[in-house]
Image: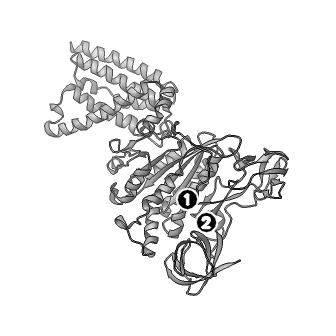
Amino acid sequence: MRKTGVISGISGPVVTVKPRQPVYMFEVTRVGSSGLLGEVIRIQKGSVYVQVYEDTSGLAYGDEVVFEDDLLSVELGPGLLGGVFDGIGRPLRTLGEEGIFLPRGANLPTIGSETVYPYLPALSPGDEVNPGDVMGRVRENANFTASVMFPPGEAPGRVAWRADEGEYSPREAVIRLEDGREFSMVQRWRVRIPRPVSTRLPLEVPLLTGQRILDTLFPIPLGGAAVLPGGFGTGKTVTQQSLAKWCSADVIIYVGCGERGNEMTEVLEEFPELVDPGTGGPLMNRTVLVANTSNMPVAAREASIYLGMTLGEFYRDMGYNVAIMADSTSRWAEALREIGGRLEEMPGEEGYPAYLGSRLAQYYERAGRSRSLGSPGRIGSITVVNAVSPAGGDFSEPVTQASLRMSGAFWALDKGLAQQRHFPAINWRQSYTLYDEMLTPWFREALGEEWFSLKAFMKEVLEKEQSLLDLVQLVGRDGLSEGDKWTLFLAELYRVLFLQQNAFSATDASFPLPRQRDLLLVLKELNDLAEAFLARGGFFEQISEFPLRAELLRLRESEEEDLAGRGAEWCTNLSEKLASLEVMAG
């Protein structure tokens, strides 16, 4: 039976409706003659409140509302990778063909039917099929093969017919069961409901980012969650884009949630031009962009992160490692605040709704590493890296604090470092990770025990620098001992050579983990040489006359693989120079 109602009130994106039949929470609606998409967000007495995902201009009292007897869903299947979608899953490239502005009430499918894909079946007639089983594989693009899975929630059955190897449209049936049910490559899933998994697994393998400060000091595992807070101009978007290009994830979901239109335009223009360093093909071949800019309907912003998470879960179930970059959850929280105000809800801290923390938890808890349903066995993960934009860079505001409680890594961006052109502008004193202990076995096996001592030494030098800088304020640099002068200089070398990274350098934009260890080893050997020289009566000024910084920068930028060997050779030459200095001084 068709369920309908009439509009009895309008407040921005929130529309009050008098329903003629019973409705349920989060039911999808079509509002007015234009069929604007919305969903039920409150049921109260004889009225329901509908959150409309489009501009409500032109709606009038008494307009009809149709309830679709379903929750907000998205189509999942081949054709998602390389796509650009709005916050509710509509393809923006297709919508853009009608003009520069989004048409009202557009009801386009997420996946088109025009393209055909090479399909290879994995089942035969007579086989039993259960939820999550791989029915076949499809070549989605030149660099990516996707699985076609039996939808979760469907009753098991036995295969009566399956499509032969060949090219098919995503909506063509590729399998038919004995009970008559047919399934294509496309399935639908409700975005607010987590997709089921067989088993949740421990987080044991790091997400390698190619960024030295993150991989060394603040690593996160595949399936972990990190928060990237920072004020305006600190490099949140650039850092996330670097992670999207260089991290070890198989699939990237980039969600532009309420960001400025010009920032999102840069992403849409630059991402198609980027080359995937792993395959040599376009980075977009393994990327999905969800664009919901600040001038787009605020209600769709609230749905966009659930859409991104559902897309990530789909590829996780195939056995891929997925990284979700959401920029930023502060804008998402602002959408919650605006809608909550129109519903006249009791505000919490700084006007945010009291359920802000629980909504964030529902999102973060969908990250993780897991074994998928069905056969063959597959293990995948979803890693979340969320940018937060605290007003005035105040990390004590509610969204940042709520995000901290849900995540395991805190990468604090520092405006002072950004103004010094130190990028990534991550403050190594404020940032932390809770994943160190669980990742220790992996790092020990991959890099050896020496890795931990090199890390500890760098942390010790950086901590000493802070106390020595406080002392310099009192006595000046000339009042320091020769050893303390060297410590300050070494800390500067760590900051410039290791913690700072050049995104425009082919060799430095992404730094493999073994090279990170080798660079730390060179700096430690340099310290040993300098301390031995000072212990024999040498002076810091004698060491500082050498162009150490310039030579080490050339060593770091070298394209040769054997950084450790070149570093050892450089240290040997330096040792000989220091010895000659000592002879001359004598």
Kindly give the residue lying farthest to the bottom in the view shown.
Answer: 62
For image coordinates 49% across by 77% down, the residue present is: 12
Q: Position of residue 59 (x, y in %)?
A: 56, 83
245 on left or right of 580: right
Q: Position of residue 576 (x, y in %)?
A: 34, 15
Whether residue 362 is visible here, answered yes or no, is yes
Identify which amino acid the numbered label 2 is placed on: Leu
Residue of label 1: 306
Pick the quarter of the image with the C terminus. top left
Badge 2 density bin: few <14, some 14–19, many ≥20, Cα 10 Å: many
For image coordinates 51% across by 83% down, the residue present is: 9
SS under mark 2: loop
> In terms of image quadrants, where is residue 466?
top left
63 on left or right of 365: right
Vertical comparison of 301 with 316: above or below: below
Q: CA distance from mark 1 to mark 2?
A: 10 Å
Numbered disc total: 2
Whether residue 162 is visible here, answered yes or no, is no
Residue of label 2: 72
SS under mark 1: helix
> In terms of image quadrants, where is residue 463?
top left
Q: Position of residue 199 (x, y in %)?
A: 60, 43
Vertical comparison of 361 with 529: above or below: below
Pick the quarter of the image with the N terminus. bottom right
Q: Position of residue 232 (x, y in %)?
A: 38, 57
